[in-house]
Image (spheres, grey):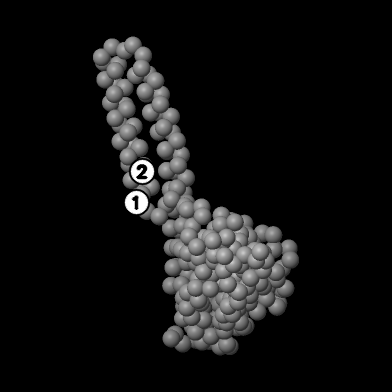
């Protein structure tokens, strides 16, 4: 544990200590964005190659001399080669975004994320000099559809923000699960600085950050994109000076048999 130098702001120290965790999240976001872009590229390339192939086939169907035919034949072989490369790219990584994902237990996801943040919580407690607590409260049951890797990153981004909000005065982050009608919810609340009313509509915008160089402004953008892709939504309530609550709602999967009749 590093010693606290007088005059050095707590904020700076927490920044240094949390670097590893930030890096992990940042990397996860980057890989995610890369995967997302690759998915779009693969999709577009496939469409274009299909058009090129169809045109070559049409051109080969008319009367040609052997030279013209040979040129088209080579173009056709090259196009098929390109399609194969694109296909290999699609299969090589986790770049095909599964719209539905598998069946997912949000309680397990919450427990995993809480465990992931435990070292961060301990370090923050020491640096801030006041208790920083993390509470987990699980309630309700039922599976949702989604991809664990993506939803874990989305949740981790929201939890990271909750801890950031405690930087100056300590406090508590609570992650709870609940059930409400046909949705399962994860609520991440903190007793931190809160968000001014006039910023509430901006915080999900790409690159919006109040953390200067330290922020990327992409955490909430990513979180919302993932949650909405699985049919859910994120809502936020906040009182400046008192804290914030982010609620992720995801529809219960019919297959889990937990939707009330
Ligand atoms: N729990 C929270 N408490 C206070 N402010 C928050 C909280 N969560 C998000 N914010 C605000 O939303 C902004 C955007 O968050 P985010 O997209 O994760 O980017 P970043 O954390 O890199 O700034 C933050 O800079 C902060 O101003
Ligand atoms: Mg963030």
User: In terms of image quadrants, where is residue 51?
Assistant: top left
The number of discs equals 2
**Is 102 situated above or below 162?**
above
Q: Along the horizontal axis of the image, is 241 left or right of 217?
A: right
Kindly tell me whether residue 187 is visible in this rendering.
no
User: In terms of image quadrants, where is residue 94?
Assistant: bottom left
Q: Which residue is nearer to you in this view: 258 or 202?
A: 258
Query: Which secondary structure lies at badge 2?
Result: helix
Q: Residue at x 66, y 64 (%)?
A: 261
Q: Residue at x 57, y 82 (%)?
A: 135
What is the x, y in percent for residue 133?
A: 57, 84
What is the x, y in percent for residue 146?
A: 51, 60
Kindly tell me whether residue 32 is visible in this rendering.
yes
Q: Which residue is nearer to you in this view: 76 or 255?
A: 255
For disc 2, the neighbor class at 10 Å (few under 14, some 14 to 19, many from 20) is some
- Which residue lies under the disc numbered 1? 92
Q: Which residue is nearer to you in this view: 149 or 160?
A: 149
> Which of the numbered marks, if any, corresponds to residue 228?
none
> Disc 2, ligand 1: is the CB inside 8 Å?
no
Q: CA distance from mark 2 to mark 1?
A: 9 Å
What is the x, y in percent for residue 71?
A: 29, 21
> Which of the numbered marks, if any, corresponds to residue 87?
2
Q: Along the horizontal axis of the image, is 172 left or right of 199?
A: left
For disc 1, the neighbor class at 10 Å (few under 14, some 14 to 19, many from 20) is few
């Amino acid at each position: 544990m590093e010693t606290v130098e007088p005059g050095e702001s707590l904020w700076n120290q927490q920044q240094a200590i949390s670097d590893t965790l930030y890096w992990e999240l940042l990397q996860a976001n980057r890989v995610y964005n890369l995967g997302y872009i690759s998915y779009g590229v693969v999709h577009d390339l496939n469409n274009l190659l299909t058009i090129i192939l169809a045109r070559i086939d049409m051109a080969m169907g008319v009367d040609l001399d052997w030279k013209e035919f040979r040129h088209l034949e080579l173009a056709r072989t090259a196009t098929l080669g390109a399609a194969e490369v694109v296909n290999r790219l699609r299969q090589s990584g986790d770049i095909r975004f599964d719209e539905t994902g598998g069946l997912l237990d949000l309680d397990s996801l919450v427990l995993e994320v809480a465990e992931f943040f435990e070292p961060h919580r301990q370090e923050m407690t020491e640096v801030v000099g006041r208790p920083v607590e993390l509470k987990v409260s699980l309630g309700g049951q039922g599976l949702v559809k989604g991809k664990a890797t993506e939803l874990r990153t989305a949740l981790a981004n929201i939890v990271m923000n909750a801890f950031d909000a405690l930087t100056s005065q300590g406090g508590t982050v609570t992650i709870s699960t609940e059930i409400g009608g046909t949705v399962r919810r994860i609520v991440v609340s903190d007793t931190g600085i809160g968000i001014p009313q006039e910023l509430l509509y901006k915080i999900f915008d790409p690159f919006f950050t109040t953390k200067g160089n330290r922020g990327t402004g992409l955490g909430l953008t990513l979180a919302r994109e993932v949650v909405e892709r699985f049919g859910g939504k994120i809502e936020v309530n906040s009182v400046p000076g008192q804290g914030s609550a982010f609620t992720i709602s995801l529809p219960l999967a019919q297959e889990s048999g937990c939707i009330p009749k």
